[in-house]
Structure formats: structure tokens, C-alpha cells
Image (spheres, grey):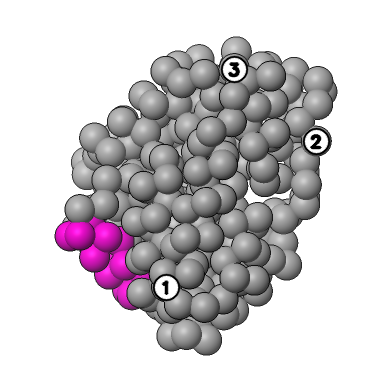
Amino acid sequence: MSAFLQAAIRVGREGACPAIAPYLTAGDGGFERSLAVMHAIEKAGAVCLELGLPFSDPLADGPILQAAAQRSLAEGMTPVRTLELIRTYREEGGLMAVLLFSYINPLLVGLGGLGASAERLAEAGGDGFVVPDLPPELAQELQDPCAELDLGTVFFATPRSSPARIRAAAEASTGFLYCVGRTGVTGQRTCFDAEVLGWLDQVRALAGSTPLTVGFGVAEPADISALAGHTDLAISGSALVQLLHRTGGSPQDGAQAAHDFVAALCRAQPK
């Protein structure tokens, strides 16, 4: 995996609480606003960014992220333009690991296939892929070029996954294993109670040395506190995307709102 992704995982494993990895829909509010937000959340303490490539039929996304994707597409955001956003962020000194969150269709149609997508992401300065509709048993066409290019691959475990399925997903993940905090789509709150935390501990035992991240429902500092000791990173998506949409305004306004939101998550302390 890339040096940026290695650094992000190291921060998560060494910290008292999970490291913060926000989700942002590329181009929601415009290219310049997304770029400003990326720099702002890095300054706030985020170590990794899950950058969503907007798609018209995002099956795992709830209404908040679906609406963000539609706004981004209306702004003219494309797969190629999304890679340009990553490239510009790197050229301006950005140090977060950047994982491209994309459904398989935009990679095939918009970037010329899985192998070409890997080559183009690496050239732009990205660090790996999160492809929710690509299971590990069908992912060889993406995994092989990613291994050659030091890009991470991220696969999923859900509360409905069998132990064998979790092991297979962990073995295939060269970035981290994405633990879905609950079944359903993004944007709903998750209660990180003893049942969920117990499941995460079971996943940890099954995953071996593969780092873990938790997503779906992470929205406030109390969630980060609850997850301390149970995961290496935590992804907060819908809450941040909704905040940015409600904030409106200039790129600077969005950047300030994102900075304050992420900084609060980064200040969380274990319970």
C-alpha cells in the first residue's frame, strides 16, 4: 500500500481513539469547494479521505449521499474530473490518504476498465479503491494492478457476513477491512452499543492483522468515543455531506464548517 495509507493506518492503531476518515462526494458544491474542504479536513486532523465518485445509481447510499451525487453530476463532475481533484490536492501539498469510493460502473465506463482505473488513480496520486458492488471473489482484475501500483483495496464485512466471508474479505483487503456498522444504506444513525462493539471484536479476531474501519452511522464525537479500542479508523460521511449542503456559501464557508466538524471528531476521548 502507499506511504500515505500506511501513515493513516499507523495513526489509527497508535491512537486512543480511531483515526478519522471523512467521506466527501467529489464536486458537491463545485470543484473548488471540494478542494478547499479536502485541505480543511486534513488540517483538522483527518488522516484519510474516502472520496466519492458521483454516480447516478448508488445502491448502498441513502438519500443524503444520493442527493449529493446528483448535485455533483449537475455541476458537471465526471470520473476524469474527480481524478483531477485528487491530482490538484496532491500538487498543493495534500498529505491525507485518498481512497476513491466508486461503484463498478463508473470505473468501467468512465475510466476505461478496472486496470485502467488503477493506473489513472495512481498517476493522479490516489491511494486505493473502495468499490462496494465488487466482491473479493470477482475483484482479481482490480487487485492485480493495485498490487503492482501500491494501491490499497478495501472490501466489506457486515453483521450478516459469515465468519468465512469476513476472513475472505480481510485477506483480500490490502488497505483495511470496511466494517458496516449495521445493515441498510448510509445516512441512518447507528447505536454503537454492546452488540455492535461485540461484533466488531469478533471481526477483529477473524481479520487477523488487517486494519479495520467502521462506517455507516458515525456522526458525532460520542460515536468515536464508543468505538475506541474496537476499530482503527472511523468513516463519517452523511453527517458531513449534509452539513456542507446546509452550510452553502463559498468554498471558504464550506471549508470552515468541515474543519470544525472533523476537529470535533478528532478531539474525542475514549469512554
Give how far apart the Cα atoms at labels 1 and 3 are: 35 Å
- Residue type at mark 1 is Pro
In x, y percent, where is residue 159? 75, 32
The reply to whether residue 32 is visible in this rendering is yes
Q: Which mark is residue 72?
A: none
- Residue type at mark 2 is Cys
Mark 2 surroundings: few (<14), some (14-19) or many (≥20) residues within 10 A: some
When the figure is inspected, residue 257 is found, relative to residue 211, above or below; the finding is: below
Give how far apart the Cα atoms at labels 3 and 2 are: 16 Å
Mark 1 surroundings: few (<14), some (14-19) or many (≥20) residues within 10 A: some
Q: Quadrant of the C terminus?
A: top right
In x, y percent, where is residue 5? 33, 37
Q: Is residue 199 magenta?
A: no
Give the prevailing secondary structure in the magenta stretch: helix
When the figure is inspected, residue 226 is found, relative to residue 214, above or below; the finding is: above
Q: Quadrant of the N terminus?
A: top left
| Residue on which the image places disc 3 | 229
Q: Earlier in the sequence, mark 1 or mark 2?
A: 2
